[in-house]
Image: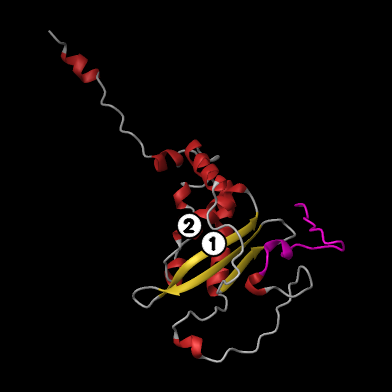
Amino acid sequence: MTDANDNLSASAPEPARSSAAADSVSSAGPSAGMEARIRQAIQNPQNLGEMADADSVGTVGSPDCGDMLRMWVKFKLDDRGRKVIDRATFQTFGCETAIAVASVATELISGKTVEEALGYSGTELAAPLGPLPPMKIHCAQLVEGALRSALQAPQAAVPGTAAQTAPAPENKPAQNPATGGANRAGGGSLVESFQAPVGGRVKLRPKE
């Protein structure tokens, strides 16, 4: 005969935790799941590189500290006549996590309006990777800052809009404070934002 106490001592199976929940357990560093997603994003980064015909460009960071990120954005009109993000690309001098966050973020904002994209926080832009540890939050903030800089900067008119027919103001080449020269169309390569000494080599300043 089965003792009733045997049934009472039997514990119910522990429910399986989602990968997101498992990722959030450790705040000291990235979980194995998040590290795997970061590796995958770095091995196959999406939308990496300059965009020659970008409508807007945003840059955040400083060559003095070494962390910089530039984002190019191209717009289009969707089926409802809304101005949406057609494509976004990026370049960065930063850690691998910044590359991974920028990669997934540029995919996430595709097809979004400016208002919708501005509504994303750095945490939300990095969400496809899983919860970031505190020491990596600045990587998501770097991506958020570059996106906001691009979306809030003066933008080229989207084909088919009334703004396209307005006369364009006379523009003088913007001076790049880091190089002392004019920026190329589309914002130029991020490497040009670093001090380039005589001889053409790029000088990367170490963190202090």
Label 2 Cα crowd, 10 Å radius (few <14 / some 14-19 / many 20+)? many
Marks 2 and 1, how far apart in space? 7 Å
At label 1, the amino acid type is Glu
Along the polypeptide, which appears first: circle 2 or circle 1? Answer: 2
Q: Disc 2, disc 1: CB below 8 Å?
A: yes
Determine whether 181 is above or below 4 in the image. Answer: below
Instruction: Return the residue found at the far left.
Output: 1
> Which contiguous range is marked in magenta?
188-207
Left of 57 or right of it: where is 119?
Answer: left
Q: Residue drawn at (48%, 55%), measured in percent from left and top? A: 123
Q: Position of residue 182 (x, y in %)?
A: 74, 75
Q: Position of residue 67 (x, y in %)?
A: 67, 56
Left of 110 or right of it: where is 208?
Answer: right
| Residue in front for this viewpoint, 134 or 163 | 163
Could you tell me which secondary element the residue under label 1 belongs to? helix
- Identify the disc placed on residue 144: 1
Q: Quadrant of residue 183?
A: bottom right
- Identify the disc placed on residue 56: none
Is 192 a magenta residue? yes
Q: Residue drawn at (48%, 72%), measured in percent from left and top? A: 75
Q: Quadrant of residue 152?
A: bottom right
At label 2, the amino acid type is Leu
